[in-house]
Amino acid sequence: LYTVVITLNCLLTQLVVNYSGELPALKQALYREQLLSERLIILVGFLVAPAVFMSIAMNRLMAEFVQRADQADAAIAMNLAVADKLRRYDTDGVSEILAAHAGRVDAKLLEAFAAIQHNLQEYRPHIPDYIIAATTTLDGDEEDGVAT
């Protein structure tokens, strides 16, 4: 639009210059019109450009907010699932959950749970069997005085 207006103004200016001897009042009027239209285009550009840039920035911020909210939801779901598996001492189930949530949650959170899961697997031979048996019941009843 700006280019079309400028081109049109240039053509009109050339027309006035060619006939300047005959139409000096028209030349001045067209020159004033050209200056006014250029100033108007510049003013509109200064008003529209910031609005466009603000719109783009707000869209990017909203997209980032939605992405982070999705990551937080995935992290909460993973934390609840891992806590439930750890409560039952189901270290293999924890591995499956961590693998399923890889890339959806923060890598540091995955590393922390992987370290806890690894340590529990390493210490499993040193934990008495009756504690593991009591924590692995799935029916929710108390067994050996330990609530599940």
Image (cartoon, grey):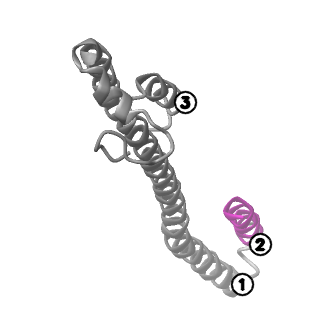
According to the image, label 1 marks what residue? 26
- Front position in the image: 109 or 21: 109
Which quadrant does the N terminus fall into? bottom right
Instruction: Tell me which amino acid carries mark 2.
Output: Tyr
According to the image, label 2 marks what residue? 19
Regarding mark 1 in the picture, which secondary structure is present there?
A: helix
Give the CA separation, mark 2 to mark 3.
79 Å
Residue 9 position in % (x across, y down): 70, 68
Residues at discs 2 and 1 in contact (Cβ within 8 Å): yes
Give the CA separation, mark 3 to mark 1.
77 Å
- Front position in the image: 11 or 43: 43
**Tag of residue 100:** 3
Looking at the image, tell me whether mark 2 or mark 3 is earlier in sequence order.
2
Left-right relation of 52 to 132: right
Residue 132 position in % (x across, y down): 33, 27
Instruction: Give yes or no for residue 3 being in the magenta stretch.
Output: yes
Rendered position, 45 above or below 104: below
Instruction: Tell me which amino acid carries mark 3.
Output: Ala
Residue drawn at x 38%, y 45% as measured from the top left: 148
Residue 7 appears in view: yes
**Magenta-highlighted residues:** 1-16
Residue 134 position in % (x across, y down): 35, 34
Regarding mark 3 in the picture, which secondary structure is present there?
A: helix
Front of the two marks 2 and 1: 1
Front of the two marks 3 and 1: 3
Quarter of the rendering containing residue 18: bottom right
Instruction: Tell me which amino acid carries mark 1.
Output: Leu
Looking at the image, tell me whether mark 2 or mark 1 is earlier in sequence order.
2
Residue 49 position in % (x across, y down): 53, 65
